[in-house]
Image (cartoon, grey):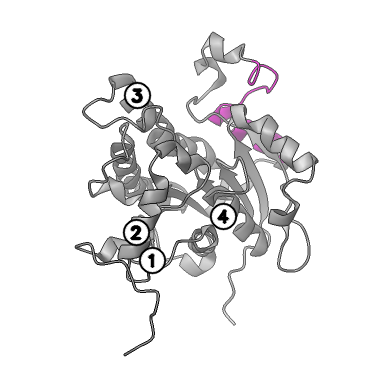
Amino acid sequence: MLPIDLTGKRALVAGVADDNGFGWAIAKAFAEAGASVCVATWPPALNIFLTLFERGKLEESRAMPDGSKLTFERIYPLDAMFDAFDDVPEEVRENKRYKDLGDYSISGVANRLVADFGDQPLDIVFHSLANGPEVKKPLLEVSRAGYLAASSASAYSLVSMVQRLGPLMRRGGAFCSLTYMASEKAVPGYGGGMSSAKAQLESDTRLLAYEAGRQWGHRVNTISAGPYASRAASAIGIIENMVKYCTANSPIPEELSAREVGTTAAFLCSPLASGITGSTVYVDKGYHAMGMAVAPPSEDRTPR
């Protein structure tokens, strides 16, 4: 056997707010491989997420193959738009969903990790964060503020996390993130500057891989996942059509599962992938390899 073994490692998965998306599947895959897992959740979604946990609404999703339940060492509040608490505007600090949470900036989470687990508390950081406030707008209609907000939340947040969490990781650590093929090809409907933000994320992955590799021995990769109808993706407005189109036109004409992305993340962040860094790894049933649309697959796939 050649197992994915993350025993003795601690992972932080930033961007988990429910059991329906890639973030949850990634956290679960890390735990299945033996890692201790902390998650970071956007403050406006935090109370709902904690309530679901406390009321047992996530019990089925928490089930692990060995009969145990998925648990998190810590659930931290994180708003990755802010590098430090001093950057938070007064109106956000006083918002009822924020004001009692302490320091929810990227630096704040870094400080909490050190306080909870010591000077080098991490081995793995997964960036499962994206937000574009004008994602439903075509690029011709997006405002400067909306465009820059998408870049800040979806791309610069990775740079900031590597800056602040890289020094806290034991040598040979792994960063990974989620991107989407709109970074390199036109996907009408994926608007608000999000396609540009994903292109930034992929470019930054390559340079961060060099800089973090030379400075700390860490690896940095990104997963280009196919469309998946999570609750977060519903903000796009056309996610169901995206899933159907890609399913019909992929070499393997099946819908992508969140678990397939989760297990790829576990591999990329494990010692088995020690030679992989600066890479964009496609997990999309092969859709990225196609050059044209094809007819929807027949229900009868019996070889003739």
Q: Which mark is residue 207?
A: none
Q: Which element is circle 1 on?
A: loop
Residue 113 drawn in magenta:
yes
Q: Which element is circle 2 on?
A: helix
Q: Nearer the viewer, mark 4 or mark 1?
A: 1
Residue picked out by circle 3: 146
Q: Which element is circle 4 on?
A: helix
How many neighbours does mark 4 have within 10 angstroms: few (below 14), some (14-19), or many (20 or more)?
A: many
Instruction: Work out how far the residue at label 3 is from the one at label 2, CA to CA, in angstroms.
Output: 27 Å
Of labels 3 and 1, earlier in sequence is 3
User: Quadrant where the N terminus lies?
Assistant: bottom right
Instruction: Work out how far the residue at label 2 is from the one at label 4, CA to CA, in angstroms.
Output: 22 Å
Residue picked out by circle 1: 285
Residue picked out by circle 4: 26
Give the residue type that dot 2 points to.
Answer: Cys
Q: Residue at x 50, y 24 (%)?
A: 82
Q: Are marks 1 and 2 in contact (CB under 8 Å)?
A: yes
Residue picked out by circle 2: 246
Q: Position of residue 8 (x, y in %)?
A: 68, 59
